[in-house]
Image: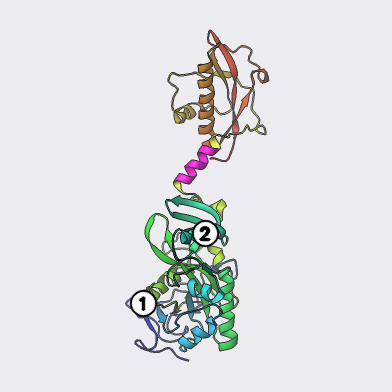
Amino acid sequence: MTAPQHGGAASGVSGGVSGGVAGMSGGPEAGGGGGVNGATNGGRRGVSDPGAGGGGGVSAALPVGFEVRAVTGIGEVRPGDDLAALIATAAPWLVDGDILVVTSKVVSKAEGQLVDVPLDEPAREAAREAVLRAETSRVVARRGATQIVQTHHGFVLASAGIDASNVEPTRLVLLPKDPDASARWLRDELLERFGLRVAVVVTDTMGRPWRMGLTDVAIGAAGIDAMTDYRGVLDPYGNELQLTQMAVIDELAGAADLVKGKTGQVPVAVVRGLPVRPDGHGGGAAALIRGADADLFSLGTAEAVAKGLRAAADIRDAPAIPFPQLPTHVLPLASPAPAASASAAAVASGAGRLLLVWAPEGDLRRALEAGMEVQRIRAGLAADGVASSWLEVDQVDLSGVEVPEGGVPLGVLAIGRGSLPSL
């Protein structure tokens, strides 16, 4: 099978990355296309381990161009439809080495990932909220009716990817249950039944933090590595790249959407001329999910502030952290009391100190103010990861410590040299 010329059964765009080179029109072996595994350019040392995790190593010169073509004529996809046969029939020009980029919506429809909802409000919104709760692992941020959530897959996106577009008004489309498994199934079917050795990327549309607009990203993949790992490779100036891992399948998803669009019922595109895995499915798109332990922005701003305030209201002592018996210092009570941040800054440099808290004898209001000030200081310290504990007066040797005239000690704030997770 050979690909049609431009203007044939498939429409698309082709682009080059050097000297105006046009996209490939032959198979992946044409020109500088896919499957290249020769030496690297300019003395750069390559790092090649395509089987490790979800990232392939740099083992070849970059291709000089690639082609993106829309697959038209697939039509409406319904539950139980044979997606592999629909694609193979609509694109008889597919060749080995092509990369199929498939919108998750048609995958979900074929797999029956649909939910019936009423047409009329408020029942429709109530049903949608129930579906959203079921698809949500945790809420990341909420602004009015908009919810950014983490799904059970690990994806972070608006409304858990639930979609009411390009579907009957009485239905909602959910994400595929396992997009990587869906990609593997489609790839296997095309090989076993149609003799096509292709890669598959399943995509969905998401927003981006700090940037306006949406773009398609990969949520499933098979036959292609999720990332190209440049770590350890030298740039043309001899600098070793330390962190660069390019999300190749996300880049493919964005490129394919240029010909798929959102309103033309074109759910599949083909990318030709880029390297794919020589064998095996690879680690899939799950390799691109950033774990919560590595996520610096795991909550929205308002949600992070609220979490901090809740934590500040329940600061626990840290008995496991040793508090050295250092000279005790009297904690001054200013009137009015300083801001919490200023108080925390004033005592933060005194890590390892024992601060005596006092109030005028019989003055309940000043005693209450002292307790409030201690809590504000502890909250500021905890936000900076500094541990503290409240000690009763009889737990600390206060001999030689002078309390201002007329004052009585209330307790001791111990500030440790250890650290706690910040709020």
Q: Secondary structure at mark 1?
A: strand
Which one is in front, 62 or 278?
278
The location of residue 334, given as percent across then percent down, is 45, 19
Tell me which segment is drawn in magenta: 302-310
Q: Is residue 273 above or below residue 368?
A: below
Q: Position of residue 140 (x, y in %)?
A: 50, 52
The percent position of residue 255, horizontal first and vertical second, equals 40, 72
> Is residue 178 among the parts visible in the rendering?
yes
Residue at far top of view: 405
Name the amino acid, label 1.
Gly
N-term-proximal mark, 1 vs 2: 1
- What residue type is disc 2 on? Leu
Residue 318 in magenta? no
Residue 152, quarter of the rendered image: bottom right
**Which mark, by number, is residue 203?**
none
The residue located at (64%, 12%) in the rendering is 399
* 19 sits left or right of 87 in the view: left
Which disc number belongs to residue 132? 2
- Residue at the image position 48 percent from the left and 86 percent from the top: 94
- State the residue at coordinates (49%, 61%): 128
Residue placed under numbered mark 1 in the picture: 15
Between disc 1 and disc 2, the foreground one is: 2
* Quarter of the figure with residue 412: top right
Residue 20 relative to residue 311: left or right: left
